[in-house]
Amino acid sequence: MNKHRLLFLLCWIAYFSTYIGRQNYAASMSEIIAAEGYLNRTCGLVGTGFFITYGLGQIISGFLGDRFSPKWMIFTGIFLSSLSNLSMCFLTSPEAMTAVWCVNGAAQSMTWSPLLRIFSEYLPEKEQKTACVNIATTYPAAVFLIYPLCSFLIYVSGWRMVFLVSGGFMLAVSLLWASGFAWLERLYPEREGSCTRKSMDQYGTNTQCFRVTGNLILLLSLAGFLLTIQGALRDGVTGWVPSYLSNTYEVGTFITIFATAFLPFINLFGVYFANLIYRKGRKMNWKPRPSYL
């Protein structure tokens, strides 16, 4: 296995662990409601708090990722997320859970932007697109693992064991990331600065730079808005399906949690189907027809 594949595998494991540390709450929420007697809307606020801090943190992390080492940003995010998960084992009120899960959202927001920077700076250009597509498998893989695992742990010990196992796993991954990335860095030659700096030098004048930057901000804002809607729908459906099945059909929580594990395959199919269309279009040299209106 070459160094590029080892690097991607390490990044895959790191980002996979973040989904374990966020989807475990959605997977165990129906059991928390049933076991602790909390209201649905009260437990729903815990997940809402996560997405608020996660979304705001993504904006901040995007700027910090250009100035700080991506290795230590990802390590810090995974490490703090593991502590948040371990803390959930000892909490007895939804207010405290909301506060801790907000910290978890802010911590996990520190992983995505640095991960993309690693792809752009370490991987060859031909492998960057493949890596960005394949990293999408972390979500269905994590959900397919965490939902049956949560079902088993809840059946054996209760919902608190879910966060104990998840937090311990993330703690181990954070140590693996720090040591593994430090070893992989020695396999790569010294680079001449970030790709952001290189691309900015190609534009020449300040006027061209501002024009291109403005267009990029507009396009990225639109893409971010659409991705936010898609992510909210995806995580909302995955998060509330166990509670819906349990409350509507009076099915046991461990059965509903296990059944939800098959939803992410629809998401994975969409990712690879879109990539297939893109590759076919490239081979056919397809270009949009110009408009003369």
Image (cartoon, rainbow, N blue to C red):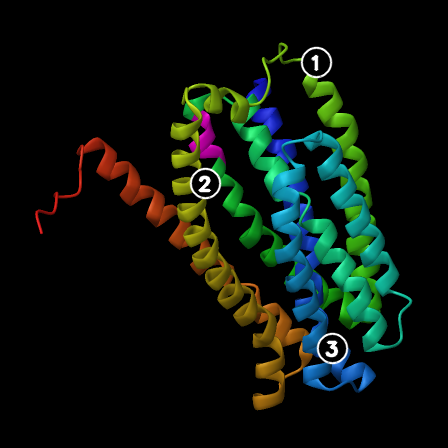
Residue toward you, 162 or 217: 217
Residue 126: percent from left, percent from top: 41, 24
> What is the chief secondary structure element of the magenta stretch?
helix
Residue at x-position 81% and y-position 48%: 80
Residue 293: percent from left, percent from top: 9, 52
Residue 241: percent from left, percent from top: 56, 75
Q: Find numbered disc 1 in the image and state the secondary structure of the residue it sits on.
A: loop
How far apart are labels 3 and 2 at the CA level?
A: 34 Å
Identified by mark 3, the residue type is Glu
Nearest to viewer (mark 3 / mark 2):
2
Q: Is 134 located above or below residue 5 in the figure?
A: below
Q: Which mark is residue 133?
A: 2
N-terminal-most mark, 3 or 1: 3
Identified by mark 2, the residue type is Val
- Which residue is the site of mark 3? 31
- Which residue is the site of mark 1? 186
Q: Find numbered disc 3 in the image and state the secondary structure of the residue it sits on.
A: helix
Residue 269: percent from left, percent from top: 40, 53
Q: Quadrant of the N terminus?
A: top right
Q: Per the image, is 125 magenta? A: no
Q: Find numbered disc 2 in the image and state the secondary structure of the residue it sits on.
A: helix
Which class describes the residues within 10 Å of circle 1: few (<14), some (14-19), or many (20+)?
few
Which class describes the residues within 10 Å of circle 2: few (<14), some (14-19), or many (20+)?
some
Residue 124 appears in view: yes
Which class describes the residues within 10 Å of circle 3: few (<14), some (14-19), or many (20+)?
many
